[in-house]
Each structure stands twice: as C-alpha cells, then as structure tokens.
Image: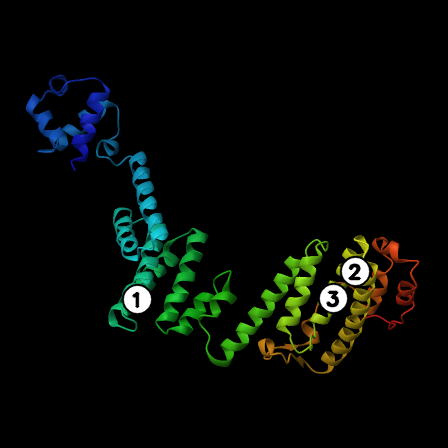
C-alpha cells in the first residue's frame, strides 16, 4: 500500500482540487501526481516539504506516521489480539503479538504480549519437553527480562516478573525464579511455582492458612449476615477437621458472638444462648492453648495444616485483656438487652473468668 500517495489523494480531495490543479500548484506534471496517487512512484525527497507545507500537515502525517494513525493501528491490533482470547486461537495471537512488536518496538506492552504468546505457544502448540518448546520458553524469558530491565512502568514490570517466574520454573530454573518472585507484590503466590519438596509443602500450607483467614474476614464483615457467619464457622471446621483449632479458637469465639447478635436481633433467643455457650468454651480453650504455646510451639494436627505451628511470639493482640474477659464484656453490649431477663443469660453473666492481664 502506497501510504504517502493515498495521503496526498485524501488531502487533495479534502481541498476539492483536481490532479491537474495540484500539479500546477506544485510545479510538476499532471502525470506525476497521478503516479503518486496510484502508487507507481513516490515524491522525491525534495518535494516532501513543499507538499506538507501546502497541505499544512507534518511530514510524519504525510507518510502516515501521525499520532492518530498510530492510535488507529494500535486499536486494530488490540481488537484482533482481544478476539483471540475469545476464540482461544493461540497461533493467531502469537502472530499478532509478533506483528505488534515489530511495528512498535518501543512499546513494552506489546513485548509482554509477545513474551506471553511465546509461553502459550510453547504450552499449547509444542510437544512437551521438546527442544522446540524449550526454545519458545527461552524466548519468553528473554523478552520478559528486557521489559524488567528497561521499562519504568511498575504495572508492566510486575506483569513481566510474574510471567518470568512461571517460565523460569517451566525451564527448571527454580532458584533464579525464586529470586524474581521475591521482587513481586504477590511473592508468596509466585513462590509456589519455585519451591519443591518439604519447603514447597510448608509454603503451600502457609498460603492456605492465610487465604483461610482472609476468607473468614470477608465472610464476617459487618457481623450481620447469619448465613455468612455460619459459612465461616463451617469452613474453619472443614479445614481443621480434628478440632485442634489452636489460634482459630479465637476466631470461633468471636464468630459465635456475632452469630448470637444475629439470633438476638431475629428473636431466636435459644439459638443465641447456645452460641454464647460455645463462644465461652472457645475463649477458655484459646487461653489454654496460648499458655502452652508460650512454653513450646504447638502443632496443627489436621492433614491440611499439619506442617504448621502456633508460636506465641507470632501472635499480636489488640489489648491486654484475656479472651474470657472479652467474652463477659460482650455480654454487656446493648444488642443483647432483649436477653437480660432470661435466666440462662443471667447464668452466662455469672460465669467465672480468669483474672489478670495478658
């Protein structure tokens, strides 16, 4: 496609000029303008400035290098690239990525496209463990490293680190992958790809426990949805299926308080009282566990967390009161006023709690 000839034709027509008129203005033969627009020839370099000056455009725009043209091309590439994610065409995505990088070599996003495509092509289009697959992984690593070393955009850099860790792991270069994983905001997640053996098993269990606590926090947010609160309780008991809850005695103690609030509000007073009783038991259990953990770290015994321990030094408290003391404080909240005249609630108020501070 003769970009400059097409552009001259567009600009000429925009000014409602004939080829003969433009030829007269520029001092060239009519046939010369015709050949430019047909793509047979291109203007001599000496003619670029006069043509651009007459049409009041830059030389870049005359050659189709204007910002608007670039943006249109980028939009086209992105649309084509996006469609491959809808139809799963890995080969087409690979070709588009190569084309985008070739046309815009200074664009690091396109280089990440290419690095991703090399990796996807290796996984989906190459024989496993073949030299061809290895070569594509190596190219992916090369492109990711180029982004990391030269790009100042932190988001693109983190995207490159993430992809690099996965591909270094695919190549068996796990130690190198681990060093890059530590540079990423989601380093714990990425280390799952780098570690092996017992180290990997311990790390995975730490990730599970962390995800468990995050999920419980999300479910308990607002403390007013009984279905979410009961789901949180069930999840804890599913993960820690042998009853050796350790730190989660604290979590369950509070969970039952929040459940009691919901049941009190809905008038289900017997259920609220049962939740209080469970909360009190967990508060006592937690203090027992914590006292033992101060002497020696205590191990989880459920299969999913059996490589982890509870060390008292790793626990942070928001106050100095003991958990059973907190339990008694909760009973004074106004949310539980509808229960105050019940004998079973008065019995809860009479429960003994340990003295002292943490």
**Among numbered discs 2 and 3, the one appearing first in the sequence:** 2
Q: Secondary structure at mark 2?
A: helix
User: Between disc 2 and disc 1, whose residue precedes?
Assistant: 1
In the rendered image, the residue lying farthest to the bottom is: 296
Identify the mark at residue 138; answer none if there is no mark: 1
Q: Looking at the picture, how far across and down is residue 223, in whole percent?
A: 72, 56
Report whether residue 74 is seen.
yes
- Is 103 left, or right, of 156 in this rendering? left
In the rendered view of the protein, which quadrant contains the C terminus? Answer: bottom right
Q: CA distance from mark 2 to mark 3?
A: 23 Å
Please state which of the two labelled residues, at mark 2 or mark 3, is closer to the viewer.
2
Q: Nearer the viewer, residue 230 or 146?
A: 230
Q: Is residue 257 above or below residue 92?
A: below
Circle 3 residues within 10 Å: few <14, some 14–19, many ≥20: few
Q: Position of residue 68 (x, y in %)?
A: 32, 34
Residue 211 appears at what percent x and percent y? 58, 65
Which of the 4 image quarters holds residue 228?
Answer: bottom right
Return the residue at label 3: 317
Disc 2 to disc 1: CB gap under 8 Å: no
Q: Is residue 108 visible?
A: no
Sequence-first disc among 3 and 1 = 1
Quadrant of res 159: bottom left
Determine whether the residue tagged by mark 1 lies in a helix, strand or loop: helix
User: Where residue 260 is drawn, which disc sits there?
Assistant: 2
Measure the alpha-carbon separation of dots 3 and 1.
48 Å
The answer to whether residue 295 is above or below residue 79 is below
Q: Quadrant of the N terminus?
A: top left
Scheme of image coloration: rainbow
């Amino acid at each position: 496609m003769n970009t400059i000839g097409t552009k001259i034709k567009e600009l000429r027509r925009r000014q409602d000029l004939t080829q003969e008129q433009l030829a007269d203005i520029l001092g060239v033969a009519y046939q010369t303008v015709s050949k430019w627009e047909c793509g047979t020839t291109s203007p001599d370099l000496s003619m670029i400035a006069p043509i651009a000056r007459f049409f009041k455009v830059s030389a870049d725009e005359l050659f189709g290098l204007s910002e608007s043209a670039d943006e249109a091309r980028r939009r086209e590439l992105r649309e084509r690239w996006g469609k491959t994610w809808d139809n799963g065409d890995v080969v087409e995505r690979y070709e588009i990525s190569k084309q985008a990088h070739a046309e815009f070599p200074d664009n690091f996003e396109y280089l990440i496209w290419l690095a991703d495509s090399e990796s996807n092509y290796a996984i989906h289009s190459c024989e496993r463990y073949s030299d061809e697959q290895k070569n594509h992984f190596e190219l992916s690593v090369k492109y990711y490293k180029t982004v990391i070393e030269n790009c100042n955009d932190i988001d693109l850099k983190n995207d490159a680190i993430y992809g690099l860790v996965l591909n270094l792991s695919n190549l068996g270069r796990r130690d190198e992958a681990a060093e890059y994983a530590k540079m990423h905001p989601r380093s714990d997640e990425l280390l799952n790809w780098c570690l092996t053996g017992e180290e990997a098993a311990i790390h995975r269990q730490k990730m599970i426990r962390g995800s468990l606590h995050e999920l419980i926090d999300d479910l308990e947010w607002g403390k007013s949805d009984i279905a979410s609160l009961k789901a949180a309780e069930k999840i804890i008991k599913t993960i820690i299926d042998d009853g050796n809850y350790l730190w989660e005695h604290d979590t369950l103690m509070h969970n039952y308080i929040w459940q009691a609030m919901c049941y009190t509000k809905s008038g289900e007073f017997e259920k609220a009282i049962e939740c209080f009783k469970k909360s009190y038991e967990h508060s006592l259990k937690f203090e027992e566990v914590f006292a033992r953990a101060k002497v020696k770290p205590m191990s989880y015994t459920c299969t999913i967390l059996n490589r982890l321990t509870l060390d008292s030094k790793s626990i942070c408290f928001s106050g100095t009161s003991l958990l059973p003391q907190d339990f008694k404080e909760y009973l004074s909240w106004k949310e539980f006023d509808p229960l105050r005249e019940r004998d079973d609630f008065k019995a809860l108020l009479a429960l003994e709690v340990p003295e002292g501070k943490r």
